[in-house]
Amino acid sequence: MNEKQMKKRITKRMLLRFLISLLISFTLIFAAALTMLWLNSFPPLEGYKGLSNTIKWINNRIDLLGLIALAASPIIIVFIQWKQLISYLSSLAARLESIDNPDTEKIVLPSVLKEAEDQLNQIKASIKEKDIIARQAEQRKNDLVVYLAHDLKTPISSIIGYLTLLRDEKQISHEMHDRYIQVTLKNAERLDELINEFFEITRFNLAHVSLNYSTVNLNRMLEQMLFELHPLLSGKNLTYRLDLPSEIELTCDVDKMQRVFDNLLRNAVYYSFDHSEIQIHANLSDSTVKLYFMNSGYTIPPEKIGRIFEQFYRLDSSRSTQYGGAGLGLAIAKQVVELHHGRISASSSDNQICFSIELPRS
């Protein structure tokens, strides 16, 4: 309900209360006048001369007193409702102070402010839910920082160890020398990946990022990215099938969209069965392109699919960060796609995993 509708409903309710109060007061005044006239029709009661004189005095001035009562009733009712309105606003202001406190009870306002009460409770519930999500994300981030810091020790220790061997062992064979160099290089590359994860955690905020649009051939972009992933694909004996309509032109921020596709392709590699196939295909319409990234892997449970785009959420909940990174890739992908006014979703069943992205073509 918008502000205009709420204002209209509250005004209507206040006016209705005023009219009902006015009707009741006029009815009571009319009933009182009839009662006075009726009492005046009886002969004076002995012993109650003062009461009889009072009734007679009122009846002699019944017209004047009636007009005064009729004129005073709206003023008194407006005054009472004005005081009630002040009370309502005070109550509303008091409840607003606790709206951002998730530990307080449900907000209760006078019935005339029912719509405001409902909306405030919705806002309060939303704040509480966001607070819980933020705390969980912060906890996951803190855990990952600890895990990353721990995992940094392994490649560093290995690099130091093998470099020490190369320094101290002067007579090692050429074969062993190359082997030590290869292991050292592998650990240095792993160390570089872990440091990049730290950078991702510290700079994760795309809310205010501006997009630099240009037009790219989507076919060539994906072909080049798959070619660069050849070592990873070969490591698990994976193949791929790129099934796209010819020459798809896409207007986007090329660097950021390339990062989205790279993340989805790497995820497909990490979570694919060995000796399986990764499939990428697209559907085109006049205004949009919808891409599907599919691979064969263990079915992801629905409760994990529902959280897969949360920041710092990792499918592999084990402590090690050897696989799956810091859980930022899909969260960043979702933000980038939405910045392009697109949509991204995930599904999994029967040992198949599918990510779909729908983007405007221009």
Image (cartoon, rainbow, N blue to C red):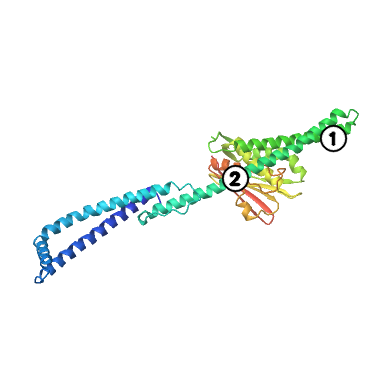
Which label sits in the foreground, 1 or 2?
2
- 238 or 324, which is in the foreground? 324
- Contact between labelled residues 2 and 1, with CB atoms less than 8 Å apart: no
**Does 309 sit left or right of 84 as displayed?**
right
Q: Residue at x 40, y 48 (%)?
A: 94
Which residue is label 2 attached to?
137
x and y percentages locating residue 59 in the rendered image: 10, 63
x and y percentages locating residue 255 in the rendered image: 61, 35
Question: How far separated are the C-alphas under marks 1 and 2?
Answer: 41 Å
- 283 or 104, which is in the foreground? 104
**Does 35 sit left or right of 141 as displayed?**
left
- 213 or 30, which is in the foreground? 30
Q: Mark 1, residues whose alpha carbon is within 10 Å: few (<14), some, or many (≥20)?
A: few
Q: Residue at x 29, y 57 (%)?
A: 17
Hey, which quadrant is residue 326 in on the image?
Answer: top right
Q: Is residue 283 visible?
A: no
Tell me the SS state at disc 2. helix
Tell me the SS state at disc 1. helix
- 189 or 83, which is in the foreground? 83
x and y percentages locating residue 196 in the rendered image: 67, 35
Q: Residue at x 62, y 54 (%)?
A: 303
Hey, which quadrant is residue 214 in on the image?
Answer: top right
Report the disc number at residue 216.
Answer: none
x and y percentages locating residue 198 in the rendered image: 66, 36
Tell me the amino acid under the disc marked 2.
Answer: Ala
Q: Is residue 291 above or below residue 256?
A: below
Which residue is label 1 attached to?
179
Tell me the amino acid under the disc marked 1.
Answer: Arg
Q: Earlier in the sequence, mark 1 or mark 2?
A: 2
**Does 163 sit left or right of 123 as displayed?**
right
